[in-house]
Image (cartoon, grey):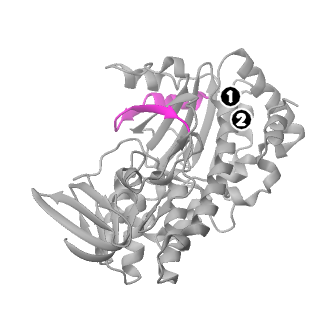
């Protein structure tokens, strides 16, 4: 575990393990360091958008994820107070329409997802260590990592360190890379339920009623990840012993009567809530190091794009590393530029989505009503959905401007 490697990856979650497997298969020596001893359900992303599914295929990981229980979702329904349930369900959006050959988004349980990729990294030849405490990271011409494992201290050097250790990244801090964040604008909570067999396991859904907005992503066999948005001023709404029941009861909505199958389902994991906001970095690399996934900045979870972003990061960085022997920071400029613009566009899409779905009160309800009416006459108002489903690069630049935002929301 000590010694010299081509690559040291700090963080053995989805991004880190996918990167370790990819680079080990390419013949590079890889040390993968993971803090946890066992992967736990912490209410992390489990939904991969169609453009993210494309990235898993380009990495050669798609079949592996399907064999581990990957579940494609075929249709989308938007519920709400501006329409009857029958109107909402009359014309579900087909999710195989965004990218040819991709049957729709892919859902897979987070702990199983992590373990599957970690095991693949090991099978591919990476040296992978769990229950690790990283104590020092040094970049520059001779990158190195010091860490403890089972009471022993270790020191390893590499040509490059890859930070894949999530939102509170210690690698990002060690690299001296600044993280920018916008202000939180609503709360977001989630829980995994099982025995929701009455819910159509090929249908995802969103909807807003009163002061609660829900998102539903089935994983198959009656398992469903349910999320909810609610006001910042009500941040402790689901705290305490009754929190889980209160959260599930919030799903009992007139606009979405099928939600009863979710409200009556069995909790299969913890309920966790957090602020919804975006973050980004200007350049996710330094001499001797590069960041991927949430360590490099994340999109507002209302878009559900954390995994898609991570898989593209892995694919872009691994392609650069495989195709070049000079791993100085300039190598990663195409990645940095693409990612910066990608995250900018996704911030725009998230801001629109949050304004439409996760603002509450009479003014917000009226905004949704006007949007629904105008969308019937001009379906292009919902074009930002293509950025979420097919990728932010599929739309022209003028679709990500302040003028466009005002037009979509009817503020012109």
**Front of the two marks 2 and 1:** 1
Q: Residues within 10 Å of mark 1 (few under 14, many from 20)?
A: many
Q: Which residues are magenta?
A: 256-277
Residue 399 belongs to magenta span? no
Q: Is residue 247 left or right of residue 9?
A: right
Residue that numbered label 1 is attached to:
80
Q: Quadrant of the C terminus?
A: top right
Residue 261 belongs to magenta span? yes
Q: Is residue 102 above or below residue 171?
A: below
Q: Is residue 184 left or right of residue 399?
A: left
Q: CA distance from mark 2 to mark 1?
A: 8 Å
Q: Is residue 394 left or right of residue 410?
A: left
Q: Is residue 98 above or below residue 399?
A: below
Query: Observer-nearest residue: 32 or 187?
Result: 32
Query: Observer-nearest residue: 32 or 8?
Result: 8
The answer to whether the residues at label 2 and label 1 have Cβ atoms under 8 Å apart is yes
Would you identify the image quadrant in which residue 68 lies?
bottom left
Would you identify the image quadrant in which residue 89 lies?
top right
């Amino acid at each position: 575990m000590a010694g010299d490697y081509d690559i040291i990856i700090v963080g053995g979650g989805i991004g880190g393990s996918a990167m370790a497997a990819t680079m080990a298969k390419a013949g590079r020596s890889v040390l993968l360091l993971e803090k946890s001893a066992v992967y736990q359900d912490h209410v992390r992303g489990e939904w991969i958008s169609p453009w993210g599914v494309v990235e898993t295929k380009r990495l050669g990981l798609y079949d592996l994820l399907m064999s581990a229980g990957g579940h494609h979702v075929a249709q989308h329904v938007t519920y709400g107070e501006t329409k009857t349930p029958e109107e909402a369900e009359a014309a579900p959006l087909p999710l195989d329409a965004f990218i040819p050959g991709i049957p729709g988004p892919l859902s897979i349980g987070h702990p199983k997802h992590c373990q599957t990729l970690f095991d693949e990294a090991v099978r591919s030849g990476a040296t992978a260590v769990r229950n690790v405490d990283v104590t020092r990271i040094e970049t520059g011409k001779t990158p190195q990592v010091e860490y403890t494992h089972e009471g022993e201290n270790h020191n390893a050097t590499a040509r490059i360190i890859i930070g894949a250790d999530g939102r509170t990244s210690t690698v990002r801090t060690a690299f001296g890379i600044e993280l920018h964040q916008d202000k939180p604008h609503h709360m977001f909570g989630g829980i995994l339920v099982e025995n929701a067999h009455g819910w159509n396991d090929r249908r995802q859904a969103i909807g807003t009623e009163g002061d609660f907005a829900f998102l539903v992503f089935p994983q198959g066999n009656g398992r469903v990840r349910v999320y909810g948005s609610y006001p910042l001023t009500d941040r402790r709404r689901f705290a305490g012993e009754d929190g889980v029941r209160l959260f599930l009861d919030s799903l009992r909505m007139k606009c979405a009567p099928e939600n009863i199958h979710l409200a009556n389902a069995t909790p299969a994991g913890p309920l966790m809530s957090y602020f919804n906001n975006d973050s980004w970095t200007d350049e996710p690399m330094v001499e001797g190091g590069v960041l991927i996934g949430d360590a490099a900045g994340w999109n507002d979870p209302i878009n559900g794009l954390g995994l898609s972003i991570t898989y593209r990061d892995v694919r872009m960085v691994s392609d650069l590393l495989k195709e070049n022997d000079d791993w100085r920071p300039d190598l990663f400029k195409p990645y940095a530029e693409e990612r910066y613009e990608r995250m900018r566009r996704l911030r725009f899409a998230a801001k629109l989505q949050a304004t439409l779905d996760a603002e509450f009160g009479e003014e917000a309800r009226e905004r949704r009503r006007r949007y629904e009416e105008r969308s019937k006459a001009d379906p292009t108002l919902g074009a930002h959905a293509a950025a979420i489903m097919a990728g932010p690069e599929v739309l022209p630049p003028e679709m990500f401007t302040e003028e466009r935002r005002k037009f979509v929301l009817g503020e012109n």
